[in-house]
Image (cartoon, helix red, strand yellow):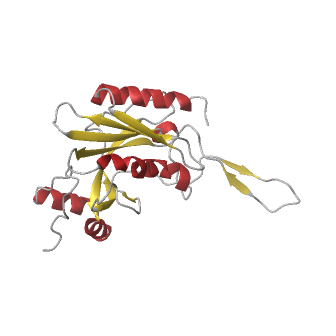
Amino acid sequence: MSDVTPLVTPLVEARLRDAFGEPAGRAAVTFLGADRVEVLRFADPTENGLLRYVTLGMSARPMTDPAGPAPEQHLSTSRFAAALSVSVADPVRGPRAELVLSVRGGRADTDKVLRPLAVLAASPQVEGVVIAPGNSLDTGEPLWPDAPFSAVLVAEGGGLVEDLALDEPMDPVRFLPVLPMTGNEAAWKRVHGAAALRERWLTYGTDLRDPRRGSVRLDG
């Protein structure tokens, strides 16, 4: 880990406090092979009953796609061995992000989302994925007890929380909203794409913050 990396998380938390105020709760989760991830819960003072769950720690390291071009390679020159290329992930450069989930409180036990959300935030380190707008992320379990959602759609950042610029050459931290999807919506999105699903939600006035909502109309 780069010496500058530990400085990122306090800056991210300061940005979140500026945007949402003091957190009403927080929980930490540690996964094998990954750094600790926290999830902070904020009660939005501008909208009565609205809760925001935000990851903290996902952006401590840049995301790297192991299938993409390696930022650095070391070639074996030994005459006793076949040519060997070893990829080394850049500890500084690369996209950084945190996840933001907004739901209406008091309608479901949404505090149980802390662990599933932390699982998603740890996936760049554990699975080597790059999370970006338009992605579908599936936890494999309900986001909270009796939730009709196990997957989320990653949306564009910059609206709720402004991007956090870091010293060069580090990429800025983006705060990406995640929108719960029902099983039918997730399957429909795989066929038709994220933009088409968002258009469906908009056309039918879907309240994406309702933790008990049903699937949007997908026929016709």
Q: Residue 180: x, y in percent? A: 28, 55
- Residue farthest along the bottom direction in this orientation: 220
Instruction: Name the foreground residue: 79 vs 103.
Output: 103
Side of 194 where 12 appears, left or right: right
Instruction: Name the foreground residue: 79 vs 118.
Output: 118
Q: Residue at x 52, y 53 (%)?
A: 65
Quarter of the N terminus within the rendering:
top right
Quarter of the C terminus within the rendering:
bottom left
* 9 lies above or below 82: above
Instruction: Name the foreground residue: 2 vs 140.
Output: 140
| Residue 138 can be seen, yes or no | yes
Side of 117 where 158 appears, left or right: left
* 149 lies above or below 107: below
| Residue 165 can be seen, yes or no | no
* 206 lies above or below 28: below
Side of 84 where 108 appears, left or right: left
- Residue farthest along the left direction in this orientation: 204
Q: Residue at x 24, y 59 (%)?
A: 195
Q: Residue 36: x, y in percent? A: 53, 41
Which quadrant would residue 200 be assigned to in this image? Answer: bottom left
Count how many numbered circles sit on residues in the image.
0
Q: Residue at x 50, y 34 (%)?
A: 170
Q: Residue 43: x, y in percent? A: 25, 34
Side of 30 where 109 appears, left or right: left
Which quadrant would residue 22 be assigned to in this image? Answer: top left
Q: Residue 4: x, y in percent? A: 56, 29
Q: Residue at x 32, y 32 (%)?
A: 24
